[in-house]
């Protein structure tokens, strides 16, 4: 599941700038930390 999300994020991040990608990466980290608990 987590790899699937990461794959989708990588696909979307191709069309994003660095700042948006950084924010998205932080959101992913927060989401992953909640789902693993």
Image: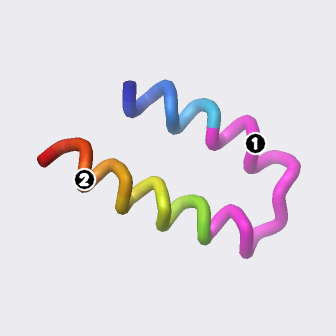
Question: Would you say 22 lies left or right of 37 here?
Answer: right
Q: Estimate the x, y position of residue 16 in percent, counting from the top left.
A: 83, 57
Q: Is residue 14 above or below residue 22?
A: above
Q: Estimate the x, y position of residue 18 in percent, counting from the top left.
A: 76, 69
Kindly identify which numbered label has been placed on residue 34. 2
Q: Is residue 35 above or below residue 22?
A: above
Q: Nearer the viewer, residue 17 or 33?
A: 33
Alpha-carbon neighbours of circle 2 within 10 Å: few (<14), some, or many (≥20)?
A: few
Q: Estimate the x, y position of residue 12 in percent, counting from the top left.
A: 75, 42
Question: Would you say 25 lies left or right of 34 here?
Answer: right
Q: Quadrant of residue 8?
A: top right
Question: Would you say 7 lies left or right of 20 here?
Answer: left
Q: Is residue 20 magenta?
A: yes
Q: Quadrant of the N terminus?
A: top left
- Per the model, the C-alpha gap separating discs 2 and 1 is 22 Å
Q: Residue lying farthest right?
A: 15
Taking the spot 74% from the left edge, 49% from the top edge, the residue there is 13
Query: Magenta-highlighted stretch: main secondary structure?
Result: helix
Q: Which residues are magenta?
A: 9-22
User: What residue is disc 1 on?
Assistant: 12
């Amino acid at each position: 599941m987590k790899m699937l999300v990461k794959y989708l994020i990588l696909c979307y991040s191709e069309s994003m700038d660095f700042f948006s990608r950084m924010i998205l990466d932080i959101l992913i980290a927060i989401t992953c930390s909640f789902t693993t608990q």
